[in-house]
């Protein structure tokens, strides 16, 4: 029962991560796209956790949720916030 | 019925409510009218995910998985600080 639940939850999280990646690509507002990318990274961290790799989660979460949005916001501040047509 | 079996059954009974909450948070994050709404939705979603991961570590009977929940909650709080700093001062601490 727990095994089936784990596989079903893994499927749901994978679908959510694909949707978040699509939204991050299609978004014109850069700050919102960065937040969508953070959602997708959180979903990937959840996938690593369910696949029993806690050490990878401990490295992946700071880099993907903390460091990457910070650097991308820094770059967005230097350029333009809205993507041109 | 042993206590261990009861706890496992209770946690499995609670999981659908967590999944419903995740769905509502994601809908709010996508349809939020302003960016603070989106960021707040991500914040609440991640704290909820941290509690959910603690329950999963009880289900899998592996205490080493608990450390990931603390790291996730702290770094999502850092994401809040970055976005709010960007919106208040238009600068990132340099």
Image (cartoon, coloured by chain):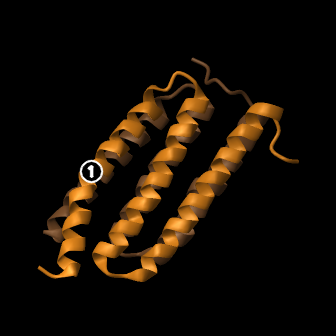
Q: Position of residue B48 (x, y in %)?
A: 44, 53
- In-image side of A10 versus B39 (left or right): left
The chain to which mark 1 is attached is: A
Image quarter for residue A35? Answer: top right
Q: Is any part of residue A48 visible from this angle? A: no
Drawn side of residue B16 relative to residue B83, left or right: left
Q: Quadrant of the N terminus of chain A?
A: bottom left
Answer with the quarter of the image where residue A75 lies.
Answer: top right
Residue at image x 28%, y 48%?
A: B17
Chain identifier matching the orange colour in the rendered picture: B
Closer-to-camera residue (B30/A37): B30
At a point 56% along the width and 70% down the height, the residue shown is A59
Of residues A29 and B22, the one nearer the viewer is: B22
Could you tell me which quadrant the C terminus of chain A lies in?
top right
Residue B40 locus on image (x, y percent):
56, 38
| Chain identifier of the brown chain | A
Q: Provide the residue designation for mark 1.
A: A12
In the image, residue B84 sits, relative to residue A41, either above or below, namely above
- Image position of B88 (left or right of A43): right
Could you say whether the residue bearing mark 1 is in a helix, strand or loop? helix
At 45% from the left and 81% from the top, the residue drawn is: B64
Q: Hey, which quadrant is residue B39 in on the image?
A: top right
**In the rendered image of this protein, does residue B46 appear above or below residue A73?**
below
């Amino acid at each position: 029962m727990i095994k089936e639940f784990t596989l079903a939850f893994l499927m749901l999280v994978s679908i959510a991560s694909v949707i978040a990646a699509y939204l991050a690509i299609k978004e014109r507002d850069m700050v919102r796209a960065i937040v969508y990318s953070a959602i997708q990274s959180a979903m990937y961290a959840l996938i690593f956790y369910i696949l029993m790799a806690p050490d990878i989660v401990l490295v992946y979460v700071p880099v993907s949720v903390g460091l990457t949005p910070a650097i991308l916001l820094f770059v967005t501040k230097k350029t333009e916030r809205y993507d041109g047509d | 019925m042993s206590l261990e079996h009861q706890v496992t059954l209770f946690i499995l009974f609670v999981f659908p409510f967590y999944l419903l909450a995740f769905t509502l948070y994601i809908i709010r994050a996508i349809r939020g009218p302003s960016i603070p709404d989106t960021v707040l939705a991500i914040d609440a979603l991640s704290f909820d995910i941290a509690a959910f991961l603690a329950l999963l570590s009880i289900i899998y009977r592996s205490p080493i998985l608990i450390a990931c929940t603390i790291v996730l909650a702290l770094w999502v709080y850092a994401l809040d600080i970055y976005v709010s700093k960007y919106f208040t001062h238009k600068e990132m601490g340099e």
